[in-house]
Amino acid sequence: MGLTRRQYLAMAGAGLCRAAENPLTRQWQRIASGTDGVVGAAALHLNSGRHASLHGGERFPLASVCKLPIAIAILAMAGEGKLSLDDQIEIPLQDVVPGVSIVAERWPGQKRFRLNELLEWMVAKSDNSAVETLFRMSGGAAGMAARFLQWQVEGMRVDRSERECALDSAGVNPIPPVSQWTPGMFEELTAKIAPQDRRRAMRRFMADPRDTATPDGTVHLLQRAFRGELLSASLTGRLVEILEAATTGSARIKGLLPAGTVVAHKTGTTATFLNLNGGTNDVGVITLPKGGQLAIAVYVKGSTRDLATREKIIAGIARSAFRRLVLTPRPFSVKIR
């Protein structure tokens, strides 16, 4: 069995545990020493409820990991009959974000897309245009807060659109109204901000509790989703299918796992200003070779190390948890603050 809500809250409120009692968290601490930032990680064996975490109750910027709960919220609306995955959704100009976006590549030649398609692109391809529209359709900040309450998931917040987060982290103030957004607005506004001011803005952004998650809260969300407690069986299957199709972050959770290991995951990465990266993340569920599943969340914030180093830390933590269950499947349950 997995964690009950009462067990989860007790786990989240537990005091400091000694790292010496658990070799897994000692490994995580050694791996985390490879960055000058803060590393938060949690692993939860979905079949037994065994759990370990490092800074599990600390908040980290979500970045594109926000697309995971937004996708679950949209799928929930489909399950409630408020939407259909076959609906044709029109993407307005203000939601078009160039760069990482299939929608932006096709727009304005194509402005309407199937909801099922947008969901897959948003999660598996991290489409930055699709998320703007789907976040609004989910009810925005109020809608997402209501969903987390309904799901009984604590330690996770989605308060703003991804573009608003990007503008805030770059030091844009005030942020123009959504109705004034255009595809090239981000570059136009941030070009006026000095690099040192952008770095200071990123520091403020990292300290902001909005649009953050704790590692423990993240694995709890994954646990509830993969156990079919948030969506119907068919919609849960669609969520898993989309997460398994993810093409981003191959050097993160999947990076050091055996070839062919199935990982359903979602990455997130903020911008980097004067070598300061706000957040580099990967969260998901690993299918274990002898059966069972391992939910894992790794967040790295405030690092000045390069992307390869940050990704290696995520991969190392994932591999250590995976090997602990596969090679020495003894119970683990420890939390290090």
Image (spheres, rainbow, N blue to C red):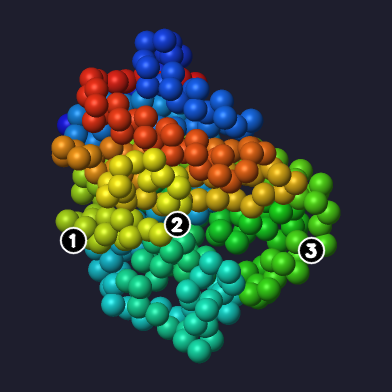
* Mark 1 vs 3: CB contact within 8 A: no
Q: Could you tell me which residue is drawn at 47 percent across and 69 percent down? A: 130
Q: Amino acid at mark 2?
A: Thr
The residue shown at (68%, 73%) is 184
The image shows residue 235, relative to residue 130, as above or below, that is: above
Residue 68 at x, y percent in the picture: 40, 54
- Give percent across and percent down for residue 216: 40, 33
In the rendered image, which residue does mark 3 sit on?
A: 191
Eye-nearest disc, 3 or 2? 2
- Label placed on residue 234: 1
Give the residue at x 76% y 50%: 198
Q: Quadrant of residue 194?
A: bottom right
Q: Which residue is mark 2?
A: 248
**Closer-to-camera residue (332/326):** 326
Instruction: Classify residue 133 as left or right of residue 69.
Output: right
Whether residue 202 is visible to the viewer of this picture, yes or no, is yes
